Amino acid sequence: MQVVEILLPIRGNKTFAYQTSSSVEKGQFVLVPFRNKKLLGIVWQTTSQFKKDSIKEIIQIYEYKLKDSFLEFLKGVAEYNMIELGIVLKMTINAFSTRESSNYIHQANCPSPISLSEEQSNAFKDLLRNAKDSLVSVIEGITGSGKTLVYLKLIEELIKDGGQALILLPEIALTTQIMQRFTELLPQTTILQWHSGLTPKKRQELWQTSLKGGDVIVIGARSALFLPFTNLKVLIIDEEHDSSFKQEEGAIYNARDMTVLRGKIENIPVVLSSATPAIETIYNYKIDKYKKIQLNSRFSGVLLPDIKIIDMTEENLPKNQFISSTLRQALENNLNNAKQSLIFLNRKGYAPITLCAKCGTKSSCPHCSSYLVFHKNKSSLECHYCGYKTNVITECSNCHSKNIVFFGPGVEKIEEELNKLFPAARLAIATSETIANQKSAAELLKKISNHEIDIIIGTQILAKGLDFKLLQLVGVIDADCNYTSGDIRAHERMHQLLSQVAGRAGRANEQGQVFLQTYEPNNHILHSIINNNQNAFFEAELHDREASNTPPFSRIAIITLSCRQENRLLEFAYKMSDTMPNLENLTVLGPSSAPLSLLRGNYRYRFILRAKKNISIQKIITHWLAQVEAPHYIKIKIDIDPYNFS
């Protein structure tokens, strides 16, 4: 009998000893008894120090096996992000099945319809050269420059003799347009999607295909990174700057960074693509860790949109109106020319604040330290953090006044205003709520493509790489975007969001128009966008980050403590502060109340750690937490390289 160590998809980092009379290999799938149930696991180690006495036997051994390099990747994800190893395993074997997958047979290499410009051809050659050395390449190009065509040409070249490719996208609900385009450009290739909306059968089949090395291109959300590919030729992150690649709940990780890790461990080339790369990505190509490839021209030959600032301090708008006279006139002209317009406001619902005009009481969530958003279409007040919902109020809970007002605009309010201005125009709202799945997204995109919609009112979901041929005008209701918030990435987010939204205009045959409504017309971020000088913004932002010793010039981690009882939480937080590490080149701030101090009924306090780049912040946290045992009622959340500072 052989004793082996089995890793199970449960909380914790430990393995469990089991014995078997059969031969097993590291990475092989097995079924084992665990307490009063049977669990699927993998062989983590084929030798063990445990004695055979009283050790349970493996129930079943499967033929399926994870590659050693993939196991190393899972271990790397766990260690870097301080996620329990069993949880990382669970992320990759959730779709395990013995069901036979569809056989995707590689077809003969045929010429594809992909046609590149001279600039794109040069970019492709550089990309291919980097790929042969398994390097990380960054395709940075203006919106509409054809970055997608270049990386698709690379995929075609790398898998022409068979193989697998993975493309990660930030918003899987909007893949219908992308899937259609990819299928047209690579007609000889099997292209499949991976996302949470797949049926169990489809997930199991695709999981099997990836494990068996079937020839396929997979387009997926961040979780697709944990598919056990065995013949992976290239990893692509499209819109690599997008914050959606950071998983904020449960196992916290950044799919972009973990993709780079997988590429390094498995010796696979990685391509990061964006018109507005993350500051960390820019820093990495500046120090030659990544290789930059630049595209400066729109593929269609059309000029970049003409961008104008509208100074809202000079507008004399009536109460509860938010569309300036300049934007209103531009919309009217665009409608008369039978062109489409996009009105952008990154705020769902009708109004973000509901308050009593007499005493000033605001409607708040009983479970979170946030205001309830008024959704007029549903006659409800909703919390966008925990999902709490209640009927819209008609009377103040504090003074019983019936003088209730709705303050500030959301997309529903803008729709109402547009309906009054242009009653004959066909309008549609696009938010993560209205296009929550692929079916509803596909229906909306079809209507837009068929010109059944004149004006689209949308949030940031429409800034994620979509291409609308008839979209000629973009109007941004609030270009200030709360950029003064305490988030170190606030300026970066503002620049990315506005640049991406502006880039939706005029991508087909004629130059588009963009109007930015702002109360700060001299804002340097807006002027970098107007002048198409994002390098100036990047340089200024890197200078500010270095001066303030924030990422990418340092490392940050946040430890968030939460508990139902605030007094118990404070007691533990101060107990932790007694053992706070006191090291050179390390700064620890806290404990302090988190900006979102109450979330889903739990009070929240946090510590922020900042260290030099060469310091292992994970080891510091591990040593710190080992000195103080957390009671069962305290939850500890660790976020390495945080994106969300709320």
Image (tube, rainbow, N blue to C red):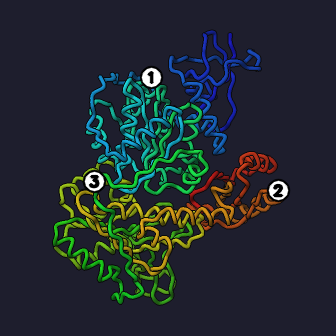
User: Where residue 226 appears, x then y in whole percent?
Assistant: 51, 36
Please give the name of the residue rendered at 30% of the width and 64% of the height, measured from the top-left corner.
Answer: 429
Residue 553 placement, left or right of 233: right
Q: Circle 2 sits on which residue?
A: 584
**Depth order, front residue of 327/194:** 327
User: Where residue 154 appears, x then y in whole percent?
Assistant: 40, 36
Disc 1, SS: loop
Count the marks.
3
Front label number (2 vs 3): 3
Disc 2, SS: loop
Q: Circle 3 sits on which residue?
A: 300
Q: Circle 1 sits on which residue?
A: 212
Q: Is residue 93 above or below residue 421?
A: above
Front label number (2 vs 1): 2
Can residue 350 be seen here? Answer: no
Residue 512 placement, left or right of 637: left
Disc 3, SS: loop
Can residue 345 be seen here? Answer: yes
Front label number (3 vs 1): 3
Q: Marks 2 and 1, how far apart in space?
A: 49 Å
**Depth order, front residue of 5/497:** 497
Residue type at numbered disc 3: Ser
Q: Which of the two discs, 2 and 3, labels the residue nearer the N terminus? A: 3
Q: Is residue 29 above or below residue 189?
A: above
